[in-house]
Amino acid sequence: MKLKIKQNILMEHLNYVIKGISNKNLIPILNCIKFELTNEGLSLTSTDNEIMINTFIKKDEIECIDTLGNIVVSGRYIYDIVKKLPNEIIDIEEVMDSKIYISTKNSSFNLNCNLVNDFPKIDLDESKNPIILSQKIFRNIINQTIFATSTQESRPVLTGLNIKINGNILECTATDSYRLASKKLELKQTMDENVNIIIPTRNLNELIKLLSDEDENINIHIFNNKIIFKFDTIIFMSKLINGTYPDTSKLIPNEFNTEITVNLKEFYNSIDRASLLTNEADKNTIKLNIDNNQIVLTSNIPEIGNVTEKVQILNMNNSDIRIAFSSKYIMDALRVLDCEEVKLLFNGEVKPIIIKNPQSDDIIQLILPIRTY
Amino acid sequence: MKLKIKQNILMEHLNYVIKGISNKNLIPILNCIKFELTNEGLSLTSTDNEIMINTFIKKDEIECIDTLGNIVVSGRYIYDIVKKLPNEIIDIEEVMDSKIYISTKNSSFNLNCNLVNDFPKIDLDESKNPIILSQKIFRNIINQTIFATSTQESRPVLTGLNIKINGNILECTATDSYRLASKKLELKQTMDENVNIIIPTRNLNELIKLLSDEDENINIHIFNNKIIFKFDTIIFMSKLINGTYPDTSKLIPNEFNTEITVNLKEFYNSIDRASLLTNEADKNTIKLNIDNNQIVLTSNIPEIGNVTEKVQILNMNNSDIRIAFSSKYIMDALRVLDCEEVKLLFNGEVKPIIIKNPQSDDIIQLILPIRTY
């Protein structure tokens, strides 16, 4: 393998594949990046066996393709070296004894390579009918739900995001069994077969770092045990979590005793302040009741002090509610709603709280109350 | 105590005193801020017994001084509360049972207070002949030397910055016994008595966060066991380290066998890249020699690979040098020199390396080589 490439171009693509390498991985080959140089261009691949990231640099972005070939080299070292090189043309050349020689005018590095055959082989098939979405919309769906996934390994299915597709409706659901976030989206296409899969949270967190803010598309190919995302120059593969995701459709009631509308930012800031006098050991409990057309939030840490916050109610059908909840969970839910006002729905102090945009049913945030009264 | 004050003004001053509180302090009173309200204004004080920070809000910056008095309250809680309150007028009032009541239109907090008499009493005297400097210049002196202080508690005097004054010459010195940074400055005043003190590094690091980038003055009052800095609205007290600072004046030779001038940025970047193939366990060793009017830097990690970097020499009296050093120490030294070119001075492979601005002897950076040849 021998080529010449501009530092900024190689760096851009190393920035993509470096995210496929876990720093904690004890298997050396999984800390590597595979370079494959063909007449079409340079392909870079990384994998930690849970995810795989591939990016392709087309031949017209490469200064000179001299000798074709493949090498596998430590990802962290090649990344740091290219990052610190000046923005000049870099020579990369495979030399004797499975080494690569990386050089610019004043710098020259020899790096030991790993065996190309030891690098995991991953099938990057395409499905017949991929889902096509704008990257921006797909990133939003993930951001608005993923925070509610569980970090507890005791129920592995809850450590991922559930994606269901029925016909042309895609629904993302995340729950840690204390709260649930769900978002529905109408696709421009109709799927022949229903989809019901679970994608690991950690893998999606790496994926969304690579997605752009623009309206460019992402193509999603779903298989039995893996999912492949194609966008820009990137192919991103994630394994799926085996198991059956709990049916959450019946958790969200259709009728509520109490419906209250408040300004989202005011409500968020009040909870944020009230949370200063809560303890994590005590589940960051805040109490809510209604007084004189205002929401009254209270919390306290006995040794330190107490707080009372008031939030103007904009709309209310019934003032009969007192309930307690985790400030952290409510703030997580409010943070992802991009609306000015927010609707709070209650069915009594032991029933779930629903938080939503008053104008839309697309996103539903459900939070279980904390029993204190 | 009872007053009304704008949130942004109180916040500005809480930002100063919060730096006097260590989060690790197990003695509750040392996590507190003392509020003292007089007819002249509001004084805020914090201390962890090693440093003390005081700031004063003049009466004309306070909306209303109602009842004079003193309170002592948890620094972290009052800081977080005021930070999250909207930029409105805040009411602060001492209420029954040694509590304070902090309120705005929609928020009200009760915080338990500590006993005013338990708060450490600290003498904030003035010396007759304070040193007067611009804050910017003083901050530069500290930044250019402090990184070379020791983090090893085995020789406490080396964990601080040495300040010596003889007549009108102020000299700052830091050393961890492997390297030394020293800066001289001509004062506009002459001191009657010689000064030779050691200020703890940690305390100076807190001080420089408070210093401005502007040319406003700082007044420095030196006592036997403490030093007091006065600037803007702030009084900052630090304890001094007891003990005799080593005499470093004879460490820096007057004559050198080899003098080399290079571009600072090029030399820094080359060392930065060469350091990628060094180990901390191996003291980040880089070898330097001269070849064909170029500095040649080499380093390697046997399992990973090796690197060669070349740096153009601008000026040289003698090419007879080969030496090894810690890349970290050289980079620390180069980072604080604000000049375009840098002069490297050598007396052979086991003698100290001196790095300096070719135009000035004010800052001297000395680094001991590593014996490898």
Image: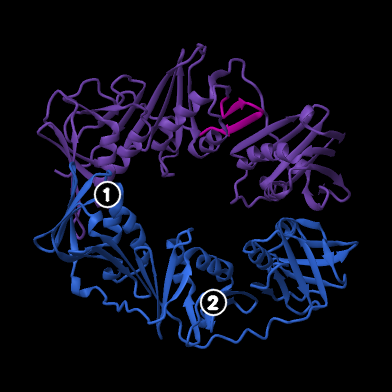
Chain colours: A blue, B purple
Query: Residue B35 in the image: x percent, y percent?
Result: 76, 38
Q: Residue furthest right?
A: A292
Q: Does A164 appear above or below B84? A: below
Location of mark 2 (residue): A152
For residue B373, side relative to residue A349 (left or right): left
Q: Residue at the spot x=53%, y=32% of the render?
A: B240
Q: Which residue is mark 1?
A: A7
Q: Amino acid at mark 2?
A: Gln
Please name the amino acid that badge 1 sits on.
Gln
Query: Would residue B171 be seen by someone viewing this image from the given angle?
Result: yes
Give how far across and how far down residue A10 sits, in percent: 28, 54
Is residue B316 toward the left or the right of residue B205 in the image? left
Q: Earlier in the sequence, mark 1 or mark 2?
A: 1
Q: Residues within 10 Å of mark 2 (few under 14, many from 20)?
A: few
Please report the bounds of the magenta region as a residue range: B223-242
Q: Is residue B298 visible?
A: no
Q: Is residue B226 magenta?
A: yes
Is B251 within the magenta?
no
Count of numbered circles on the image: 2
Instruction: Give the position of the C terminus of chain B as an image quadrant.
Output: top left
Which residue is depicted at the point 53% across and 33% down? B208
